[in-house]
Image (cartoon, rainbow, N blue to C red):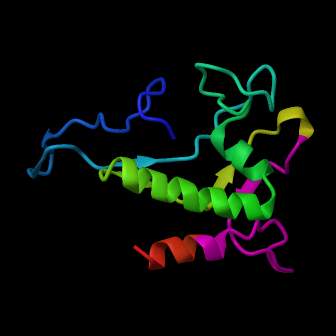
Amino acid sequence: MEVGYLDALYLKSKGGKTPSGWYCQSLPYLVEFDNFGCSRTPGEATVDSHFIWGYDEITWFYLQNEAYRQAWLRYAYHWVRENDPNGFLQMPVSRLVSLCEGKGRGKYRANNKSAGNPDGLNVEETIKELWNNQ
């Protein structure tokens, strides 16, 4: 969530004629929560690294407490919309997480936790809120 950080695409998406024939100044793009592993020092922030929190993005997000996860998703959604109108936050609904230091269960599910969905992390209502308020 920083313009100019490493290879971040914010404000850099090129435009032109698309393969389907329409033109734009800047192509739309998705911002996703990557799942690519852990740093050598999980949980420790690293400078000039893709492991900004010491974890890949979805693992870091997964490890946060419920209230912070919901608040941070709101923050991230609004940050992308305010900083680059061509960027769109891909909602983290179902992702594999990296089992760094034995933490986690290997999967992230945004659904509300229930007897039928014990792995739910209660982000479902926050996603609905963001989509309904566009």
On screen, residue 75 versus residue 83, left or right, reads right
Instruction: Give the magenta-colored segment's residue range.
Output: 103-126
Question: Which residue is at a point 38% across and 47% down the rendered structure image?
Answer: 83
User: Is residue 77 in sight in this rendering?
Assistant: yes
Asked if the magenta segment contains residue 44, the reply would be no
Residue 100 image offset from top left, x and y in percent: 83, 34
Question: Which residue is at a point 63% across and 77% down the rendered structure image?
Answer: 125
Identify the image quadrant of the C terminus: bottom left
Residue 33 image offset from top left, x and y in percent: 58, 46
Asked whether 39 or 119 is in front, the reply is 39
Asked if the magenta segment contains residue 114, the reply would be yes
Question: Which residue is at a point 86% across and 80% down the rendered structure image?
Answer: 115
On screen, residue 47 versus residue 105, left or right, reads left
Instruction: Give the quarter of the image for residue 116.
Output: bottom right
Question: In the rendered image of this protein, does residue 97 appear above or below residue 126?
Answer: above
Residue 127 image offset from top left, x and y in percent: 57, 70
Residue 85 image offset from top left, x and y in percent: 31, 53
Instruction: Give the quarter of the image for residue 19.
Output: top left
Question: Which residue is at a point 72% across and 56% down the rendered structure image?
Answer: 108
User: Is residue 90 in sight in this rendering?
Assistant: no
Q: Residue furthest right?
A: 102
| Magenta stretch: helix, strand or loop mostly | loop
Question: In the rendered image of this protein, does residue 134 appear above or below residue 96?
Answer: below
Q: How many marks?
A: 0
On screen, residue 108 versus residue 72, left or right, reads right
